[in-house]
Image: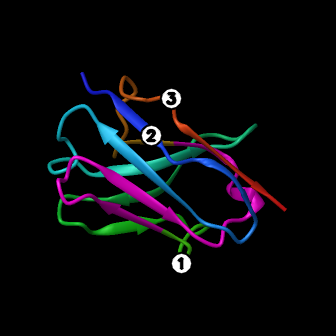
């Protein structure tokens, strides 16, 4: 079993930035692709960014050019740098492997972008 703990969310004005962190209970991101997902009110959870073991990245069109996914030096953490935030980015953000493991969802971290 793996516990995933997300942090770094908050309330920010449109155009602002936030950096989310993901800390797994064991080092899985060096061997499994990981992703940042988000769940907005009334919408399905979606994958917004992913990074594989070779550090190849992919982004949803809605965040491309604004969000950057990365791993920590220790490879036991992962980050999502979010710039030029928009109100439509408001959601609870989660990290998980790709494809996700339904038993590993953490509490997520709330990101709220005001207009």
Task: Provide the residue designation for mark 3.
Answer: 107
SS for dot 2: strand
Mark 2 and mark 1: Cα distance apart in space: 22 Å
Residue 53 lies in what quarter of the image? bottom left
Q: Residues within 10 Å of mark 2 (few under 14, many from 20)?
A: many
- Return the residue nearer the eye: 47 or 112: 112
Q: Which residue does the image show at 67% across and 68% down from the upper left?
A: 16
Distance CA(mark 3)–CA(mark 2): 7 Å
Task: Indicate the secondary structure of the residue bearing disc 1.
Answer: loop
Disc 3 is placed on an element classified as: loop
Residues in magenta, as a range: 68-93
Q: Name the residue under label 2.
A: 6
Spatial CA distance of label 1 from label 3 is 27 Å
Q: At x 58% / y 67%, what residue is drawn?
A: 63
Q: Specify the quadrant of the image occupied by residue 26.
A: top left
> Is there CB contact under 8 Å for labels 2 and 1?
no
Q: Where does residue 38 sit, x and y in percent of width and height?
A: 57, 46
Tell me where residue 75 appears, x and y as whole percent: 19, 53
Query: Residue sitting at 38 percent across and 58 percent down?
Result: 50
Specify which label sits upstream in the sequence, 2 or 1.
2
In the shown orientation, is residue 18 left or right of residue 42? left
Residue with the mark numbered 1: 65
The reply to whether dot 1 and dot 3 touch (C-beta < 8 Å) is: no
**On screen, residue 72 above or below 96:** below
Q: 27 or 45: nearer the eye?
A: 27
Marks 3 and 2 close (CB-CB < 8 Å):
yes
């Amino acid at each position: 079993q793996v516990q995933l703990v997300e942090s770094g969310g908050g309330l920010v004005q449109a155009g602002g930035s936030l950096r989310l962190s993901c800390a797994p209970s064991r080092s899985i991101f060096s061997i499994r692709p990981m992703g940042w997902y988000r769940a907005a009110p009334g919408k399905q959870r979606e994958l917004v960014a992913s990074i594989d073991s070779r550090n190849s990245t992919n982004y949803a069109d809605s965040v491309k050019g604004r969000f950057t996914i990365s791993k920590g030096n220790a490879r036991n953490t992962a980050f999502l740098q979010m710039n030029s935030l928009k109100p439509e980015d408001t959601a609870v953000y989660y990290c998980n492997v790709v494809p996700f493991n339904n038993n590993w969802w953490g509490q997520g971290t709330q990101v709220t972008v005001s207009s």
